[in-house]
Image (cartoon, helix red, strand yellow):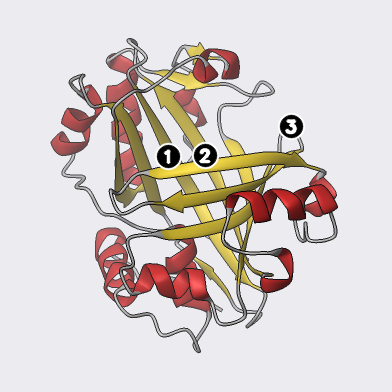
Amino acid sequence: MPEFQHLVLSDILSAMAPVTLAEMDGVKLMNRIDSKYVTTEAKIRQVLKDAAEAGYRVLETEGERISPYDSVYYDTPSLDMFRDHRNGRLVRQKVRTRCYVLSGTAFLEIKRKNNKGRTRKKRMEIPSAELMDFRGDASARGYLEQYSDFSAPMLEPVLETLFRRITLVNPSMTERLTIDTCLGFKNFRSSSEASLRDAVIIELKQDGRAASRMKQILLRHRIHPLRVSKYCVAVALTDTEALPGRFKLKIRQIEKIIDHSISRI
């Protein structure tokens, strides 16, 4: 995938107190509100400094505080899931496999969004060797049919996404923040690749009843909400036959934020 010179963030993260995966799993965010943001690595350095001063803790896995992720998205040959999102359909789904590279653990994940804007995710563990294609696994096929509107013969691997994730939690455990950097995409249909350069995608999950210190920090640095789907933006970037629709505007917004054209190969 295209290479880009990324800023080093480990120096800031090393000064933050760690939180374990077990502690994170124990946090139940009821009445949750999810918000997405896009910014640059230069700005995220300042956000991390402010977060450390505010007492935020960083997830540490296998001794590391920046975790590589590898995901493969599946869709129909006519890209029905991409088209549903592009066309603004409220009820929609995504199917992907995801590998947490440091641990080697992999999952089949099914995300369903209802017409109230709520997303429910179901997942089952699969062998890491099935990341690129789970369809030969009878248990995974049955799980897919149980929790999605699709069967394995209807789907094919469409897109691989690679990124590095930082996860923060606030002192009172009422909000989580995921920070995705080094985002790269490879389209299996077109063989095209793309990179979001130094763009950073942030997702804030917060308890709707609690005040958010992180929202104040993001606002201070002029980082504003921008709903963005990594899968849909990646398809729009790497598949000339998939009409981008409103994702063309999303790409322009990201390019304006990072002050660069997004890399395509």
Contact (CB < 8 A) between labels 1 and 2?
A: yes
How far apart in space, not on screen, are marks 1 and 3 (Cα)?
A: 19 Å
The numbered mark at residue 103 is: 3
User: Where's residue 75, x and y in %?
Assistant: 59, 69
Residue at image location 29% in from the left, 27% down from the top: 31
How far apart in space, not on screen, are marks 3 and 2 (Cα)?
A: 14 Å
Quadrant of residue 233 within the rendered picture: bottom left
SS for tag 2? strand
Q: Residues within 10 Å of mark 1 (few under 14, many from 20)?
A: many
Amino acid found under the numbered disc labelled 2: Arg
188 or 45: nearer the eye? 188
SS for tag 3? loop
Please indicate whether residue 196 sits to the left or right of residue 68 in the image.
left
The tag earlier along the polypeptide, 1 or 2, is: 2
Residue at image location 26% in from the left, 73% down from the top: 249
Classify the position of the C terminus by image quarter.
bottom right
How far apart in space, not on screen, are marks 1 and 2 (Cα)?
A: 5 Å
The tag earlier along the polypeptide, 1 or 3, is: 3
32 or 64: nearer the eye? 32
Residue at image location 66% in from the left, 21% down from the top: 63
Amino acid found under the numbered disc labelled 3: Ser
Q: Residues within 10 Å of mark 2 (few under 14, many from 20)?
A: many
Please indicate whether residue 51 sits to the left or right of residue 80 in the image.
left
Quadrant of residue 176 within the rendered picture: top left
User: Where's residue 244, x and y in %?
Assistant: 38, 80
The numbered mark at residue 179 is: 1
User: Where's residue 222, x and y in %?
Assistant: 16, 44
